[in-house]
Image (spheres, rainbow, N blue to C red):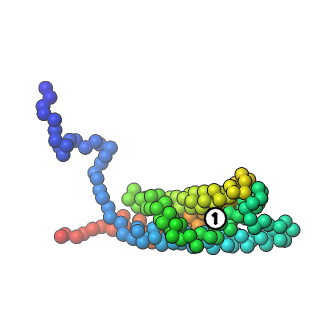
Amino acid sequence: MTGPPLPEADLPVPSYAGPVQTRRFRRIKTGLLLASLAACLGVTLLGAVSTGLLSMLGGLSGAAMNPGLRDDGFMSGMYGGMQLATYNFILFFITVPAAWLALGLSIGRLPYRGIVRRIPYVRWGSIWGAILVGSTTGLFGLIGGVMSGLGALLSGGMIGAIAGTGCGLLFHAIVKPANQLSDVDVNVF
């Protein structure tokens, strides 16, 4: 015989669910803000340095670098992608919130899952940096053609991956998830 249905509070908890613990972490929002600001500034500086290096290498080898995205060439697209990455700081009101959102939905959730090692933070910061910067530079690089778009995608992705690596390291250094997970709360009241 079956009795009346059990109230929802009295239902047995599945064994895979385990005890539900909600842990509060400090400095996550601060870490996300500082990491996204560092991403914006890092992409700009890396774009400027790589544009200068590519221009010098082009001048030394005798190959003239086309400063525009109008020609359908892979190297022209790479150069254009590096120039577009340099403008990242001018559009900070778009790039900082986009980086904050992407980092918040990726590395910002890792401490709540109990992940304390540095490698996942660096990996996901690098992946999201490459996606964000590579996709925007590649999209604008398509103005010059397919090959130009691929070159801009590659150069923007490399710049974003390097900047994202630094962001993951910075976030991990600010939040220090291992220290926060090992803290024991001895409050009585």
The quadrant of the rendering that contains the N terminus is: top left
The quarter of the displayed image where residue 70 is located: bottom right
60 or 137: nearer the eye? 137
Above or below 54: residue 8: above
Foreground residue, 48 or 141?
141
109 vs 84, left or right, is left
Is residue 87 in sight in this rendering?
Answer: yes
**Drawn side of residue 155 relative to residue 32, left or right:** right
Position of residue 3 in the picture relative to residue 116 (left or right): left
Q: Nearer the viewer, residue 11 or 48?
A: 48
Q: Amino acid at mark 1?
A: Ile
Tally of numbered tags: 1
Q: Residue at x 64, y 64 (%)?
A: 159
Measured along the vertical axis of the image, is residue 123 above or below residue 175? above
**Residue 50 percent location from the top left of the image:** 70, 69
Coordinates of residue 158 in the picture (x, y in percent): 65, 61
Where residue 30 sits in the image (x, y, percent)?
42, 72
The image quadrant that residue 32 belongs to is bottom left
Which residue is labeled 1 in the image? 159
Badge 1 element: helix
Classify mark 1: residues with Cα within 10 Å, few (<14), some (14-19) or many (20+): many
Q: Residue at x 40, y 68 (%)?
A: 29
Q: What residue sits 68% from the left and 68% below the top?
A: 83
In the rendered image, is residue 173 in sight? no
User: In the rendered image, which quarter is residue 68 located in?
Assistant: bottom right
Q: Of all residues shown, which one is farthest toward the top? A: 1
Outermost residue toward the right in this view: 62
Where, quadrant-wise, is the C terminus in this rendering? bottom left
Residue in view at x 87 percent, y 68 percent:
62
